[in-house]
Image: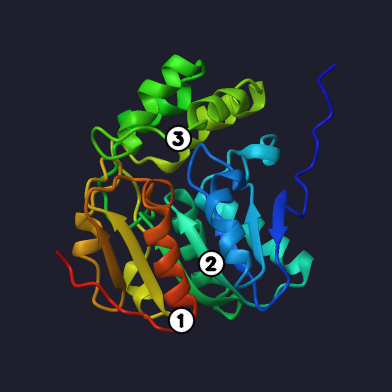
Amino acid sequence: MAPATVPNPVLLPHTARGRKGPPIVLLHGFGFDGASWAGLAAPLARMRRTVAFDLPGHGGAGHWAPTPGAAVAAKAVVASLDAMGIARATFVGHSLGGAVAALVGLRRPDLVERLVLLAPGGFGPAMNVAALRRYAHANTAAELASAAAPLFAPGAALPQGFVEALAAARRAPALRQSHAAIVEAISLGEGQGMLPLDALAAAPFPISLVWGLEDAILPASQAIEAAPEFARHLLPGVGHMPHLEAPATVLGILARTIAGRLAEAPPA
């Protein structure tokens, strides 16, 4: 007898911090979970309430059907915010989470105060699918250390405890299966599908891009070539994980952006 199907929850697993003002919603990248924001969430919570979700197929939302790409995740985030009574928020999204945040803005602009997108998916056709597949299928600490290296700038040391946390999470069979399926859902051949960037550039809220110039997963050219409506912050010596590689710099960008002092860094 086949096991009963468990329906997806209305409210995504999340960690909330702070109490003041419209929240900052934190959306992680592929293969991570809400805990990946821990280093920024605490200082951000001194400015605003923060809500760090586990996106479908990740963390506490590992059991999710169907296979959750960005569109499925965006619907789940909107449903969660509605269930929490959150009517407006600043969204900070990394990689896959950046594409999710952009889709939330396109579908429900009433929810969005501003978007800050860290190396977001969907800004160009190029994506290092081979590296993401390798990362998705890595399970042991040794495999993950090797597979995660391209996420960071060349020669950079991985953050302390980073590999151990990934390996602990990958012990769950549901996560191993979902990560393998999601990487195929978010890829298009050996690249990726694109967001409707013209519509996003015309959105009624400010959008900032934060991108490492050494990004080997999603090239920084996607930020450099983006429409002038997007503010750009290009970080030298940083790879695909700016919030982990340059947390103080990213925190400063977020603090200025949330305060409304949106200084644009010129394209390199």
Foreground mark, 2 or 3, reads: 2
Dot 2 lies on which element? strand
Q: Is residue 87 visible?
A: yes
Looking at the figure, which quarter contains the N terminus? top right
Residue 65 makes an appearance in the image: no
Mark 3 and mark 1: Cα distance apart in space = 30 Å
Callouts 3 and 1 close, C-beta under 8 Å: no
Label 3 Cα neighbours within 10 Å, binned few <14 / some 14-19 / many ≥20: many
* Amino acid at dot 3: Val
Using the image, determine if residue 60 lies above or below residue 79. Answer: above
Q: Amino acid at mark 1?
A: Phe
CA separation in Å, label 1 and label 2: 11 Å
Q: Secondary structure at mark 3?
A: helix
* Mark sitting on residue 91: 2
Where residue 263 sits: x, y (%)?
31, 79
Q: Which residue is the site of mark 1?
A: 205
